[in-house]
Amino acid sequence: MAIRVMASLLAATTIVTPALADDDIPPVLGGKTYIQHVILRAAARHPGVLAITVEGAREDGGDVVVLGSTLSAGRVFTKVASPNASLGGSASPDGKRFDVREPFNSNSGHRLGTMTISFAYRRGAATQRLVATADDIAAEVARVTLSRKNAVDPYPYDPAFTGRTYAQSLTERTILRHPELLVMMIHATPPGKSKNVIIGSNIGRIGKVADEDDLRVIEKGSTNLEIGGDNDRFETELPLLDATGKRIGALGLVFNYRDGEDKEAIHRRGLAIRDEVAKAIPNNSALFRPSR
């Protein structure tokens, strides 16, 4: 769908294919999808959880498969024989496990599949707390999942890069301060290297090399604006600055969007966040320092 941007923005912006477009995605090895990583972390934060399994169709449709399982990465991409899309909680026949089936959603509220969270249980015990915990886990997972394609990204995206950097901690702090953000990505060039990569992100893809749209922002100082998803996301990619005002990369920000919403206002919000982030970046090298 064509996008009309206010005239005052046209001189500084370029309407492109989505600013966070995917190009050549590395293969998933050993069942290590991004959503597999996400649910392993979620299970570790909630000691009472026995297992989390995520099911859904892959980006190209077709059979329902396991997208992630804390029981075994070897189950990932295996076909689900009898997909059960019904939601709610139930005890296992032996009364020792309580399963809560939750919707597996994206952070813009799209249903991507089903998530089953299993808890240790004693027959007859109250289940309200277990259901509430399952609700929390489903919300946590949705918060860091952009789309079906994102869910089955490889993790790590590039083993040469780590998520334990200042750029990543800055991203996480900024997302907490701005819950209106669906996505934040910091693109920068490692010291002594020539390829610009994602070094901070709340949806994985750490190490993803800049594509043509990213490079337009990084090298020319352009701004990419795009309506994405099902016309319900506003994606803006801005020149990333350090505290001195020097352009050091690109900053990708994604907001929820409703038809008819003021694009200029969203763009200004993105600029304000970019300027806030810039104040916390002494220089490019700081982004790659190990986080504490």
Image (spheres, rainbow, N blue to C red):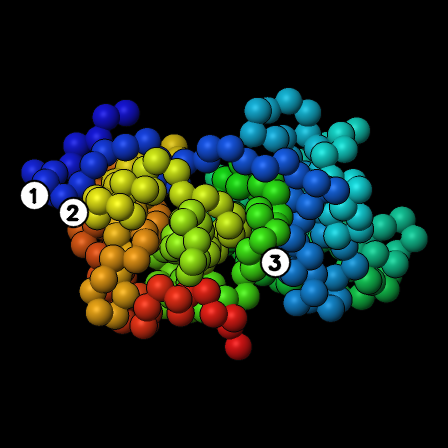
The residue wearing badge 1 is: 8
The outermost residue toward the front is 192
> Does the residue at mark 3 contact the one at mark 1 (Cβ under 8 Å)?
no
Q: Residues within 10 Å of mark 3 (few under 14, many from 20)?
A: many
Asked if residue 128 can be seen in this view, the reply is no
Residue for point 61% across, 43% down: 154
Distance of label 2 from label 3 (alpha carbons): 34 Å
Q: Position of residue 7 (x, y in %)?
A: 7, 38
Q: Which mark is residue 264?
A: 2
The answer to whether residue 10 is left or right of residue 74 is: left
Q: Nearer the viewer, mark 2 or mark 3?
A: 2
Amino acid on which disc 2 is placed: Glu
> Does the residue at mark 2 contact the one at mark 1 (Cβ under 8 Å)?
yes
Q: Residues within 10 Å of mark 1 (few under 14, many from 20)?
A: few
Q: Nearer the viewer, residue 116 or 275?
A: 275
Q: Is residue 145 above or below residue 275?
A: above
Q: Position of residue 283 (x, y in %)?
A: 32, 68
Distance of label 2 from label 1 (alpha carbons): 9 Å
Earlier residue among tags 3 and 1: 1
Residue for point 80% across, 42% down: 74
The residue wearing badge 3 is: 137
The answer to whether residue 7 is left or right of residue 257 is: left
